[in-house]
Image (cartoon, coloured by chain):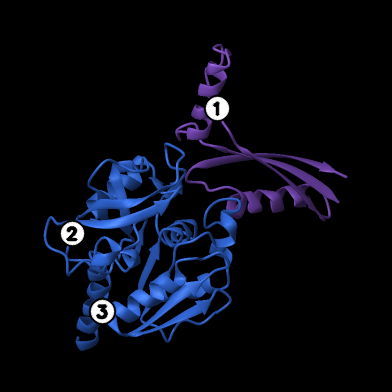
Chain colours: A purple, B blue
């Protein structure tokens, strides 16, 4: 059994209005040293696979087809045997 | 002319669309559950607004894998008219039937209001009953209608005349080039954020959406004759 921890984030070129709003609140709170906030998603996926390589191929395909939208998002993941 | 209105779990404008087709056109229209795999008996397929699968993950990202979407793709390739409104537009971009993506509104608010929308061309299957250069009133109701695509894609949309509708007043969501609705290159698949089915008679605030449906019927009749 493998566990993938996947991070999906908006591309650098894409404005993240949630991040901008959160940054504004941080500034209101006095954290004026904050220059940027980006908000993304974290997914945990458990799956069966014969080996690490097979799990990686499967998770990559899932990220490309479903978990992220390549027009606006990037993804990366950590994979561990559990 | 036979219309299918695809119903996903979480669709909520499906019956409005059914009534719009019945009231405006008086043509046959059937709600079709998203498990349907054959849409070949229909002349046009409508993907309604709403919150398919609760908008989980991304708007339209789960609906795009519903079994019915293979049939929608097949009929789109066959040249049938496909119209996605609001969540339907989001599903069409997720499915790759239209380019780009719909993101969170730049101000993060849900906007529900009548919107001035310019009709960019009137020689399309969806706009032949509008007047050249006309600005119409059609309501929007969404939090994720901020159309985005890369610069090359935008240039292609402009060059091919794929932008059918633009917001004519203040941009309500931050969409690139004020885009409110686009077609595929062939022109038979339209996705739009404004809701024409919510503007079919005066008491709704505007009757301007009705002509989108009459345009589709006129286009279909012309192509039947040829």
Q: Which residue is mark 3?
A: B217
Question: Residue at image x 35%, y 61%?
Answer: B195
Mark carried by residue B157: none
> In the picture provided, is A48 more to the left or to the right than B34?
right
Q: Nearer the viewer, mark 1 or mark 2?
A: 1
Mark carried by residue A22: 1
Question: Residue at image x 37%, y 77%?
Answer: B19
On what subunit does the disc labeled 2 rest? B
Q: Callout 2: helix, strand or loop?
A: loop
Quadrant in which residue B10 is drawn = bottom right
Quadrant in which residue B44 is drawn = bottom left
Cα distance between the residues tagged 2 and 3: 17 Å
> Residue B23, relative to residue B9: is it above or below?
below
Residue B125 visible in this rendered orientation of the protein: no
> In the picture provided, is B93 more to the left or to the right than B36?
left
Indicate the quadrant containing the C terminus of chain B: top left, top right, bottom left or bottom right.
bottom left
Crowd around label 1: few <14 · some 14–19 · many ≥20 (10 Å): some
Question: Residue at image x 50%, y 79%?
Answer: B32
Mark carried by residue B121: 2
Answer whether labels 2 and 3 touch (C-beta < 8 Å). no
Q: Position of residue B51 (x, y in %)?
A: 53, 59
């Amino acid at each position: 059994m493998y566990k993938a921890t996947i991070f999906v984030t908006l591309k650098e070129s894409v404005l993240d209005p949630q991040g901008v709003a959160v940054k504004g609140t941080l500034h209101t709170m006095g954290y004026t040293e904050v220059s940027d906030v980006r908000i993304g998603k974290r997914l945990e996926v458990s799956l069966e696979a014969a080996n690490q390589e097979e799990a990686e191929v499967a998770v990559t395909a899932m990220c490309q087809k479903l978990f992220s939208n390549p027009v606006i998002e990037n993804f990366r993941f950590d994979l561990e045997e559990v | 002319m036979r219309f299918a209105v695809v119903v996903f779990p979480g669709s909520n404008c499906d019956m409005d669309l059914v009534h719009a087709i019945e009231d405006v056109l008086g043509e046959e229209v059937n709600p079709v559950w998203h498990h349907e795999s054959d849409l070949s008996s229909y002349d046009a397929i409508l993907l309604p607004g709403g919150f398919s699968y609760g908008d989980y993950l991304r708007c339209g990202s789960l609906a795009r894998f519903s079994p019915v979407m293979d049939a929608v793709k097949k009929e789109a390739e066959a040249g049938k008219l496909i119209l996605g409104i609001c969540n339907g537009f989001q599903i069409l971009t997720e499915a790759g039937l239209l380019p780009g993506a719909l993101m969170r509104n730049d101000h993060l608010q849900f906007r529900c209001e009548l919107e001035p929308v310019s009709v960019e061309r009137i020689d399309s299957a969806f706009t032949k009953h509008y007047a050249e250069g006309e600005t119409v009133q059609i309501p929007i109701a969404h939090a994720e209608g901020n159309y985005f695509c890369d610069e090359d894609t935008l240039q292609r949309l402009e060059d091919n005349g794929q932008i059918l509708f633009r917001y004519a007043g203040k941009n309500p969501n931050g969409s690139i080039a004020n885009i409110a609705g686009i077609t595929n290159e062939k022109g038979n698949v339209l996705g739009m954020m404004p809701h024409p089915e919510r503007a079919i008679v005066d008491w709704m605030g505007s009757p301007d959406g009705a002509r989108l449906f009459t345009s589709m019927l006129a286009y279909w009749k012309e192509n039947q004759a040829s």
